[in-house]
Image: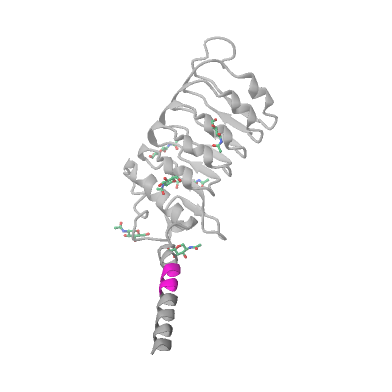
Amino acid sequence: MSAKWLLFFRSFLFLTHLAAFSTPIHKAPALNGTNVDRLALLAIKSMIKGDPQGILTSWNHSSTDFCQWQGVTCSPRHQRVTDLNLSSGGLIGTLSPSVGNLSFLRVIQLFNNSFSSEIPPEIGRLFRLRQLRLAYNSFTGNIPATIMNCSNLQVLNLGNNNLVGKIPDAIGSLSMLSILALPSNILQGGIPPEIGRLFSLQELYLFNNCWKSGLTS
Ligand SMILES: *[C@@H]1O[C@H](CO)[C@@H](O)[C@H](O)[C@H]1NC(C)=O
Ligand SMILES: *[C@@H]1O[C@H](CO)[C@@H](O)[C@H](O)[C@H]1NC(C)=O
Ligand SMILES: *[C@@H]1O[C@H](CO)[C@@H](O)[C@H](O)[C@H]1NC(C)=O
Ligand SMILES: *[C@@H]1O[C@H](CO)[C@@H](O)[C@H](O)[C@H]1NC(C)=O
Ligand SMILES: *[C@@H]1O[C@H](CO)[C@@H](O)[C@H](O)[C@H]1NC(C)=O
Ligand SMILES: *[C@@H]1O[C@H](CO)[C@@H](O)[C@H](O)[C@H]1NC(C)=O
């Protein structure tokens, strides 16, 4: 009797043990990298209020393979978003800070749309980023200083927006930069000498800003 009882008690302990260990495993499939990317893309879509060409129609909850969504390119191996190309889409809205969660991104192209409000500083978390092309939109505010953390950046084109403030001195730390285009904004404060440290620079466009004195062109 007592032996049977002991056995019962032991298996009870074993089962609670098993339950204790299996509960978190059961809850775990929460957020692997693939899900992080999917949620970030849906967050980006949620901030876009106008989409006259229906470019983001394929971006929906029922369609799970976001690598097939229009404008999205993934790495074949990891199935993580590497390119986001929504150029000339007629899109109206703001850029969600969740773009900074797409940690495999190498190229962001939002050229020629109607994005307004600020460029999210979270872009500075994208250390693999090589190209940031946001020209011909209505972005406002400063050039986020955090972008200077994207040390692999080769192309930075923020031209034809409504950006104000100074070019951050830290621009000189973008040692891979080959194209820097910031024309037709409302930038002030002159051209930082740190630009002279950009040894890879091949093209520089800064015309049509509010440089009071010194270099303009
Ligand atoms: C990520 O989790 C989802 C379930 O939420 C699963 O379908 C998918 O295979 C997982 N991907 C990886 C790479 O583990
Ligand atoms: C993006 O990441 C931040 C911080 O890691 C998190 O709080 C937020 O929920 C994420 N956004 C999405 C849409 O997953
Ligand atoms: C969701 O996207 C798929 C294509 O990826 C499309 O066939 C389907 O019609 C879309 N659903 C809605 C409700 O837009
Ligand atoms: C980006 O998308 C536009 C419109 O779909 C297309 O014309 C252009 O070739 C694409 N650019 C790249 C680099 O994929
Ligand atoms: C800008 O996008 C619109 C569509 O929204 C297109 O008609 C126009 O040709 C594009 N302009 C350039 C210069 O790409
Ligand atoms: C990025 O830049 C900001 C401000 O320039 C700085 O505070 C931060 O420590 C940098 N590093 C990361 C990983 O964001």
Horizontal and vertical percent position of residue 22: 43, 69
Residue 173 lies, with reference to residue 85, above or below; the image says above
Query: Going 40% across and 72% down the picture, which residue do you hit?
Result: 16
Residue 16 lies, with reference to residue 148, above or below; the image says below
Query: Going 40% across and 87% down the picture, which residue do you hit?
Result: 2
Which residue is at the far front? 2
Residue 130 lies, with reference to residue 30, above or below; the image says above
Horizontal and vertical percent position of residue 44: 39, 45
Horizontal and vertical percent position of residue 11: 42, 80
Horizontal and vertical percent position of residue 39: 40, 52
- Region in magenta: 16-22
Query: Going 45% across and 42% down the picture, which residue do you hit?
Result: 87
Q: Give left or right: position of 133 versus 15.
A: right
Which secondary structure class fits the magenta region best? helix
Query: Going 44% across and 73% down the picture, which residue do you hit?
Result: 18
Quarter in which the C terminus is drawn = top right
Toward the viewer: 113 or 212?
212
Which residue is at the far bottom? 1
